[in-house]
Image: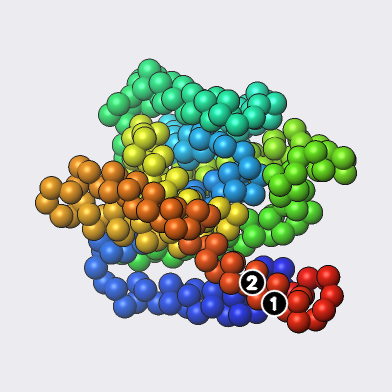
Amino acid sequence: MTAFGSPVKLAAIAVLLVVALAVPLVVEDTYVRHLFIIAFIYAIVAASWDLSLGYAGIFNFGHVAFFGIGVYATGLSAKLLGVDPWLAMVIGGLGASVAAALIALPVVRLQGVYVVLVTFAFSQLVLQVVISQSEVTGGTQGLVRVPTIELFGYNFLRDYKFGYYYVALAILVVSTIAMRWIVRSDFGLSLKALRDNEDYGLSRGIPIGLQRLKVLVVSAFFAGVAGGLFAIYLRVASPEVFGFSTLSLILSMVLVGGTSSIYGPIFAALALTFFSEGLASVEGLAEGRYMIIAAAMIVVLLFLPKGFASAFSGRSGLRRVRLRRASGTGAEVR
């Protein structure tokens, strides 16, 4: 077992990565490339949400707000302050982390539904601030004509989304590696210990408040960077990113893909993005597509309460049990 998974899993990921690298060379349709870029962005948000929701057990419903803060922090930095768009995306991540640190102060002391209420209220508060400060944010009309990225003079606006595809893929790959390293580090193990048995974790000296603060800040950073890429790519920052439709779609990606699985939400993001846009192109289904996705999510969770990722982890878990029984020892065979 390696730091990021079994050799078989790593080989499968390597194959998928090669396929992903080849997609723009084979697919010339700009709309399909656009869907991949949006899916990659949503995948980063969904996987980072799973850090706090799945691994830390924090019912954080303000994660989309961190995404939205990244959108506006990047857009405002690049357009109003003249910051280089590449650096503006980092500022978007840092802005989301600062917001996460502020919301973590009351959240780390709360449990259950109270965390949901506070984080959801925070999301709505940020939305109202964006709308009310229209002279800066553009209000309900949004912030338009956000500067685009450049790389050694390369024009990302006239290459039929070729360059943006690889930028989004690169950020997704780097984010995934970083998140996998986090969940397998001592910090990640402490989060799972507190999630599974808080009393045991406290008895081992794990500071629950500090760990929750850290995971909210870290997960928000990835969501903020994804929001920054979203603003730079679409060249607009709109209050719609705080909407319930965005929340329900990304939450569906987390739950359908599987909590406590970085890879699960990523694959679910790809599937649900194309599924959602496919429904949007069908006459009469565009307005109700999020209801259809919600219904599909309920059906999936009825049969796989922990998402599709649990189907694969369940098999590996059953195999370990059989090997343990065959060995005649109480030790787990990996």
Q: CA distance from mark 1 to mark 2?
A: 6 Å
Mark 2 surroundings: few (<14), some (14-19) or many (≥20) residues within 10 A: few
Secondary structure of residue under mark 2: helix
- Residue at the spot 20% in from the left edge and 42% down from the top edge: 287
Across and down, in percent, residue 157 comes to 31, 56
Q: Is residue 220 above or below residue 328?
A: above
| Image quadrant occupied by the C terminus | bottom right
Who's the residue at 13% across and 47% down the image? 284
**In terms of secondary structure, where does tag 1 sit?**
helix
> Residue placed at 25% from the left, 61% from the top?
31
| Residue type, label 2 | Leu
Identify which residue, 334 or 67, lies in the foreground.
334
Q: Which residue is mark 2?
A: 318
Residue 34, horizontal then vertical, whole percent: 31, 59
Q: With 1 as the anchor, is 157 left or right in this view?
A: left
Residue appearing at x 40%, y 34% in the figure: 242
Instruction: Evaluate if marks 1 and 2 touch, with contact meaning CB atoms under 8 Å apart.
Output: yes
Residue 280 seen in render:
yes
Disc on res. 322: 1
User: Amino acid type of disc 1?
Assistant: Arg
